[in-house]
Amino acid sequence: MDTTVTQLGVVVTAALRAAGYKESTIGQYLKTIRLLEDFIDARGGIYTSALGAEFAALTTSPRTGRFSAQRRFAYSRAVNVCDSYLRTGEVDLSPRQRGGGGRQPEADAFTMLNAMWEADMSGRGLAPATREAYGRITRSYLGYLEDCGISCLDDATPATVPGFFASLLDHGWAPSSLFWQVANFRPFVKFTGRGDLVDAIGLVGARRSHTIIPVLSDDDAQRLVTACASADTVSRRDAAITLLALMTGLRACDIINLRLTDIDWRAQTISLVQQKTSNPVTLPLPGLLVNPLADYLLTQRPDSNDDHVFLRSLAPHTQLADHASVYRITAETFRKAGITDVKAGTRFLRHNAASRLLRASVPLPTIAAVLGHASQESTNVYMSVDQQRLLDCVLPVPAGARP
């Protein structure tokens, strides 16, 4: 295999054109590859992953002398495709997941422990999103121990647990998020068999916050539906995704993984197995969603062998990468509808769907089934959205207590 940057550039360019990338995007790749070629030529002329990493680390702009996010993106993108070709003989153009999975432990004992924990979670069939949440906080804790000079869990004292969560606050985490991080961390320490570390979790003092969940006003909901009905305002893909989240309450992961065979057009239903709970669910296909979804599939969906319903609009035409992709789509749809005072993610839209069902006097067990909750207890939080019924529960002030 020729490992000169010139040959790598030829291979990468061919792969980009075969995948349907725009010539302007290919031109940006080639511009970076030419810079990579100059860098490698000054170091012997043969590309290696180590030299690629050195090149990708050149994130300081020579013009401004400051960090350049654009340079980091362009350089790392070019290096990633070159590295994939060296590893497999094929250019991997699949979108990279955001976040990178968090910090990885370096000590041998922690690396092995983390691998054992990952294998245990996989063996128990935990959902990918759950494994990622558990794994990320675990790796963060192991990294914290390394920063404290600890390279083996046997040397970790119970004090490291509250110390670790205090460090999260020092790095900008919101106190309200600690409850969920503690919940994600507890299974790992139970897995280690360290009862003293499990007991130390109680010292963190994390409390779950119970906020009243906001919902769309009737006027905002109408503006959103009107914007989604207009192909000139919102693309058919973005309209279908937004309406699907708004009217069914599907999680972002389930919207991303929705496949063409999950839609029964005759019965007007969507059937899928939810990623988080592994529960099967069948939902009616709302009438407002039928037209934009059908228009997208028939006229705007890119030609692709990928059978996921919603694909990237830019090459490579594969399924959406992650939750952030859906958030950007729904947030942009809200902006085009003139609704700018809410964070329009799928969590907010799930709350709105629950509110709509509750106001229609749908029983909580039915709402739990529609939202795909493993337990009806998870649905009780949505009772806070029905302000009118909450007011009906308020008792009058006794006459004797009035001034």
Image (cartoon, rainbow, N blue to C red):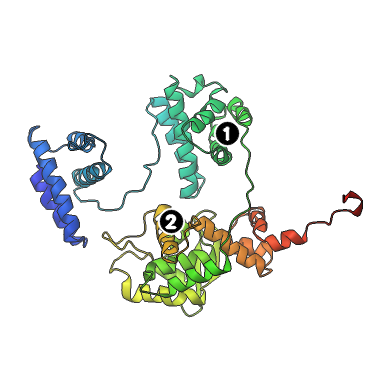
The one nearer the camera, 26 or 227, is: 227
Regarding mark 2 in the picture, which secondary structure is present there? helix
Residue at image coords 12%, 42% = 35
Indicate the position of residue 331 as horizontal and vertical percent values. Answer: 43, 59
**What amino acid type is highlighted by mark number 1?**
Lys
Regarding mark 1 in the picture, which secondary structure is present there? helix
Indicate the position of residue 187 as horizontal and vertical percent values. Answer: 56, 37
Name the residue beneath numbered marker 2: 327
- Is residue 88 left or right of 211 when viewed as pictured? left
Quarter of the image for residue 277 reads bottom right
Indicate the position of residue 107 as horizontal and vertical percent values. Answer: 39, 25
Indicate the position of residue 256 as horizontal and vertical percent values. Answer: 42, 59
Quarter of the image for residue 19 reads bottom left
* Label annotation for residue 280: none
Please identify the residue farthest to the front as the structure is shown: 403
- Is residue 31 left or right of 203 when viewed as pictured? left
* Label annotation for residue 190: 1
Q: Are there few (<14), some (14-19), or many (20+) residues within 10 Å of tag 2?
A: some
**What amino acid type is highlighted by mark number 2?**
Tyr
Residue at image coords 11%, 37% = 40
Q: Are marks 1 and 2 in contact (CB under 8 Å)?
A: no
Please identify the residue farthest to the bottom as the structure is shown: 266
Residue at image coords 41%, 73% = 293
Residue at image coords 53%, 35% = 188
Q: Quadrant of the N terminus?
A: top left
